[in-house]
């Protein structure tokens, strides 16, 4: 992938400058954004915030279903066919956005969910991102052949940390080209990155043609999603991409914080509890987003114990 990093940096700087636009009433674009109909915090000026969402992305509106944000996730190594079948049944019942499973289960999920609106997502180069780019591309192609609608690829984390940005861009591009038009989400493992690395990787994912940037695998010892990382990622990609928060998002309060920060998808194994707590909707999410902590006082999902695996460094924290 031919890449002019200087030109890319200049363009992003210009977009960030527009994010500092001051409206006549003294508010900045970032302050105005959450009250605009298209919803999430945007890096673009108010005049651009009314544009439609890109394919596969739904922005927060005044009324929405929490289920529309949920990628119902089962990525543990010991997942059984019975558990995968239950995952699909729950996703169909609550009308979640997608299920997210390991590649070996894609065909099973595609068959089980055929005829529903629930998408089948799988992971590529998971969980380390240290697979060769051509192998990631093959894995993506095979997943598409098996019926995957969405591909959550792990970026080349070591190359990000080493500053080899051309490799990072080419790696993402290889999966995008192999995706045959399916949604590609780029997992950047934000908890292990410095802010400038989050900025650069998010920008490269956008340039490479990916559809989403995603915070975490949920398996890294450094941790999972944070509202700060989500907000920074949203700032960089603007309204051109979706942002998925995953890793440790186990209850409504955490999910609402991520959505308020700009997330358009939530990767979690706690989606059923959230859907039961908030109901089938649609709900006035604007009120909930204004005060996630207030909801936490009466939240059903917040009272559930955390998965035992979350206490083990490097274990799944979805």
Image (tube, rainbow, N blue to C red):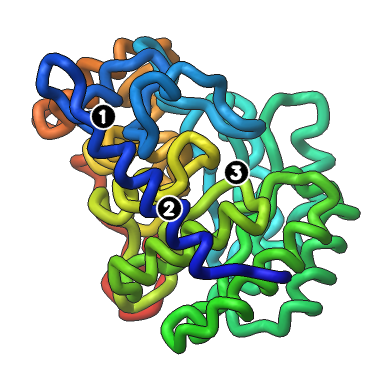
Q: How many marks?
A: 3
At 47% from the left and 79% from the top, the residue drawn is 160
Q: Quadrant of residue 134?
A: bottom right
Q: Considering the image in quadrants, where does the C terminus appear?
A: bottom left
Classify residue 202 as left or right of residue 169: left
| Res. 29 mark | 1
Residue 275 in the image, given as x and y percentages of width and height: 40, 27
Q: Is residue 152 visible?
A: yes
Q: Are the two marked residues, 3 and 2, in contact with CB atoms closer than 8 angstroms?
A: no
Q: Which residue is mark 3?
A: 87
Could you tell me residue 118's position as x and y percent? 67, 31
Q: Position of residue 38 (x, y in %)?
A: 42, 19
Identity of the residue drawn at 54% across and 38% down = 240
Q: Secondary structure at mark 3?
A: helix
Q: Is residue 48 above or below residue 30?
A: above
The one nearer the camera, 95 or 258, is: 258
Q: Marks 3 and 2, Cα distance to the nearest angstrom? A: 40 Å
Where is residue 304? Give x, y as percent.
Answer: 25, 45
């Amino acid at each position: 992938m031919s890449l002019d990093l200087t030109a890319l940096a200049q363009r992003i700087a210009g977009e960030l400058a527009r994010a500092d636009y001051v409206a006549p009433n003294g508010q900045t674009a970032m302050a105005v954004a959450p009250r605009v109909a298209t919803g999430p915090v945007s890096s673009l000026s108010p005049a651009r915030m009314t544009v439609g969402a890109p394919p596969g992305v739904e922005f927060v509106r005044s009324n929405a279903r929490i289920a529309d944000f949920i990628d119902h996730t089962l990525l543990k190594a010991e997942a059984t066919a019975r558990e995968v079948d239950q995952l699909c049944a729950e996703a169909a019942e609550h009308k979640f956005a997608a299920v997210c499973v390991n590649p070996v289960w894609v065909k099973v999920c595609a068959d089980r969910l055929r005829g529903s609106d629930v998408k089948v997502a799988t992971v590529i180069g998971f969980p380390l991102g240290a697979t060769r780019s051509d192998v990631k591309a093959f894995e993506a192609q095979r997943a598409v052949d098996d019926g995957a609608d969405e591909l959550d690829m792990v970026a080349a984390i070591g190359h990000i940390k080493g500053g080899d940005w051309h490799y990072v861009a080419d790696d993402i591009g290889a999966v995008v080209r192999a995706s045959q038009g399916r949604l590609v989400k780029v997992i950047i493992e934000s908890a292990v990155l410095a802010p400038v690395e989050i900025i650069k990787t998010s920008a490269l994912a956008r340039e490479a043609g990916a559809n989403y940037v995603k915070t975490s695998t949920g398996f890294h010892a450094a941790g999972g999603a944070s509202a700060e990382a989500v907000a920074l990622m949203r700032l960089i990609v603007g309204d051109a991409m979706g942002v998925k928060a995953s890793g440790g998002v186990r209850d409504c309060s955490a999910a609402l914080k991520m959505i308020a920060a700009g997330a358009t998808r939530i990767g979690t194994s706690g989606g059923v509890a959230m859907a039961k707590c908030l109901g089938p909707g649609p709900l006035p999410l604007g009120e909930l987003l204004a005060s996630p902590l207030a909801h936490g006082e009466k939240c059903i999902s917040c009272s559930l114990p955390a998965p035992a695996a979350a206490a083990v460094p490097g274990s799944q924290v979805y």
